[in-house]
Image (tube, rainbow, N blue to C red):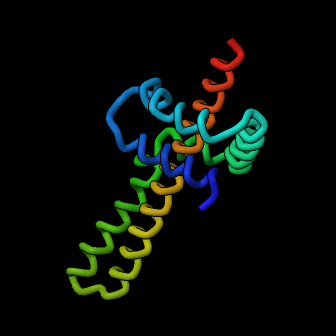
Amino acid sequence: MDLKDQLIRAAEDELTQYSTDLRKIEKLRPKVSLRMTPGDRQRLREELTAELAANAPWSGIVEKNRQAAALPFWGIFGLGLLLGALGTTWAFGVGILGAYAGFLLQRWGWQLQARRLLLQTLDDVDRRAAA
């Protein structure tokens, strides 16, 4: 696992904590500033910006409202289980597909949020280094 993946995992770990974004950035800053040179930080910033801009139309919606975006798929899952219990066997398959799609959508939103948090941390490190 390279440094970029390690930092994204650290950002995902910080997302699990119930705290403000500033506190999450504060906890991530030592991990970023001690491991990376300014050139590495600039390259990582460019990579993260490119990744976030690649899926621009949908990524903003999924990043901000990942649970609301996945809600229709969880509804399909519930409906599939209900209809499957009533004797419609194909509905179980539709329900499983709905659960899988909902899970993937929420995971994608989680990864987008982690990348955005890491990008904010990189900006904060550079801003403090310049001051």
**Is residue 56 visible in the rendered structure shown here?**
no
Residue in the picture at 43% in, 61% down? 102
Of residues 79 and 23, which is closer to you in this image? Answer: 23
Q: Is residue 34 visible?
A: yes
Picture coordinates of residue 47 (x, y %)?
Answer: 74, 46
The foreground one among 61 and 63 is: 63
Q: Which image quarter: residue 18?
A: top left
Q: Is residue 61 shown left or right of residue 84?
A: right
> Residue placed farthest to the left in the image?
86
Residue displayed at 52% across by 42% down: 113
Q: Is residue 63 above or below residue 78?
A: above
Looking at the picture, does residue 117 appear above or below residue 109? above
Q: Position of residue 49 (x, y in %)?
A: 72, 41
- 45 relative to 102 in the view: left or right: right
Q: Is residue 94 above or below residue 102?
A: below
- Quadrant location of the C terminus in the rendered image: top right
Residue at image coords 42%, 26% = 23
Q: With respect to residue 32, does 111 lie above or below?
A: below
Name the residue: 42% across, 46% down: 13
Q: Quadrant of the N terminus?
A: bottom right
Question: What is the x, y in percent for residue 64?
Answer: 50, 38
Q: Residue furthest top?
A: 131
In the rendering, at what x and y percent does residue 30 appear?
52, 33
